[in-house]
Amino acid sequence: MSLRIAIATNNNKGLEDTISKEFGHSKTFTIIKIEEKEIKDIKMIQNPANKLNHGKGPIIAKHLANMKNRHDNHRRIRPRCFNNT
């Protein structure tokens, strides 16, 4: 079984990048593919909604879900799953 994790990040530095404080305002997303407890692939993509003023979250979630559908079975993507306290 494989798992893909999309992390909102600040640059194009892969695993060396810093995590963005805000999902919608991140410059990039680092997508990590994990299979059998090992990292198999790392991709960096630009935030498709970075230039928008409103409605970034749903656009990003849809973009990530569409990417996931091309490769794996789709699982729900929940942009607000982290507590930023």
Image (tube, rainbow, N blue to C red):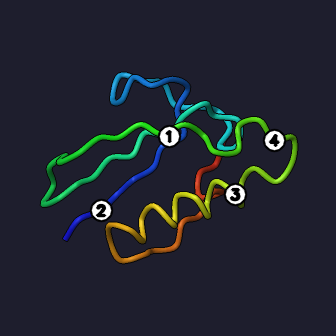
N-terminal label among 1 and 4 = 1
Asked whether the residues under the numbered discs 3 and 4 touch, taking CB atoms below 8 Å apart as contact, a structural biologist would say yes
Q: Amino acid at mark 1?
A: Phe
Q: Quick one: quadrant of the N terminus?
A: bottom left
Tags 1 and 3 touching, CB below 8 Å: no
Q: Quadrant of residue 36?
A: bottom left
Frontmost of labels 1 and 2 is 1
Disc 3 secondary structure class: helix
Identified at 23% across, 54% down, the residue is 34
| 5 or 70: nearer the viewer | 70
Q: Which residue is mark 2?
A: 3
Q: What residue is drawn where x is 45% and y is 49%? A: 6
Q: Quadrant of residue 49?
A: top right
In what element is the residue under mark 4? loop
Q: Residues within 10 Å of mark 1 (few under 14, many from 20)?
A: many
Residue 13 at x, y = what percent? Answer: 39, 23
Which residue corresponds to mark 1? 29
Name which residue type carries label 2.
Answer: Leu
Mark before the other along the chain sequence, 1 or 3: 1
Q: Nearer the viewer, residue 15 or 71?
A: 71
In the foreground, 51 or 2 = 51
> What SS does tag 1 mark?
strand
Q: For the point 17% across and 48% down, which residue is it?
A: 40
Q: Which mark, residue 52?
A: 4
Q: Are marks 1 and 4 in contact (CB under 8 Å)?
A: no
Q: Which residue is mark 3?
A: 59
